Amino acid sequence: MNDGYELLDSGNGRKLERYGDVVLARPCAQAVWQPKNPLLWENAVASFDRSEGLNWQGRGNLSTAWQVEIAGVVMKLSATDFGHLGVFPETRALWQWIRATLAEQRKKGREPRFLNLFAYSGGATLAAAQSGAQCCHLDASKGMVEWARENAALNQLENAPIRWIVDDVIKFLRREVKRDTRYDAILLDPPSFGRGKKGELYKIEESLMETLDLVHQVLSDDPCFVLLTSHTPGFSPIVLSNLLRQYHDGGTLACGEMLLTGKPGTMEVPNGNWARWVNG
């Protein structure tokens, strides 16, 4: 996948990545092997570690924010105090699948409605909007929704049919059920642990089943897909697939790992899992 992101190397519990022209080294617990190209790591302009708290080295070498095109979506990046940048590049293949799948629906004369829950900085929302779908983007963090709206403007999608919602997912879904609002395609990326708009507690082990039940209730009569992703340890591709299987007897189920990838020969790094149900 040729774009502004590239995994350069990994190992010793670290990953070396390129975001545009910026090369960064950050933690990666699953990279238990030895680095393949140790000399490449000298190119890192900044690094982050959690060995003694949360620490950036060389953060002053970074711009306050910079832009990178990833899988056809321009994203604003910024080094946060927790070591995040505002994008999870392991999801980029899913963005492409969402964009292509919804574009195909539009070719068939449909006007698909796409709901993105726990939507973060909006990569999937914007990929869906690029297909012409009507979108609803929901996250409990006002700051992340504002970040996503900035990304929409970077992609000339500020006037696209996107509802921007700051809310607790479960409360929002309950209201959508009462309003009889329906969606044709739904993506959800529940956190291991999170807080809603008003401090509502979300623990994936306790809340996911109710979330999936509500997701099932807001699906349209002729839906396209439900896509479930997770970074929570233990929620393997088969676990996620089994969770979706409870609600969908027909259609097609698929699952797999989300991967950080680079040029041919670069060892891929798994970083989360996905499962999806596709109607028909």
Image (tube, grey):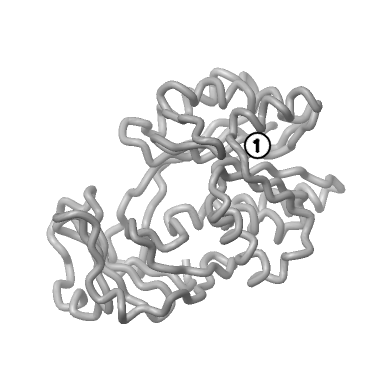
**Residue 150 in the image: above or below residue 192:** below
Horizontal and vertical percent for residue 34?
A: 12, 60
The quadrant the C terminus occupies is: top right
Task: Check disc 1: other Cα within 10 Å, few if <14, some if 14-19, many if 20+.
Answer: many
Of residue 264 and residue 20, the one placed in the foreground of this image is 20
Give the residue at x 69% y 23%.
217
Give the residue at x 76% y 51%.
133
Q: Quadrant of residue 19?
A: bottom left
Residue at the far front in the pictured view: 198
Check disc 1 and give the amino acid type. Phe
Horizontal and vertical percent for residue 134?
A: 77, 49
* Number of numbered callouts drawn: 1
Give the residue at x 77% y 47%.
105
Tell whether 268 sits left or right of 68. Answer: left
User: Where does label 1 land, which residue?
Assistant: 225
**Residue 137 in the image: above or below residue 152:** above
Horizontal and vertical percent for residue 45?
A: 27, 79
Dot 1: element: strand
**Residue 6 in the image: above or below residue 89:** below
**Residue 250 in the image: above or below residue 5:** above
Horizontal and vertical percent for residue 208?
A: 49, 26
Give the residue at x 77% y 57%.
132
Tell whether 29 sits left or right of 237. Answer: left
Q: Quadrant of residue 14?
A: bottom left
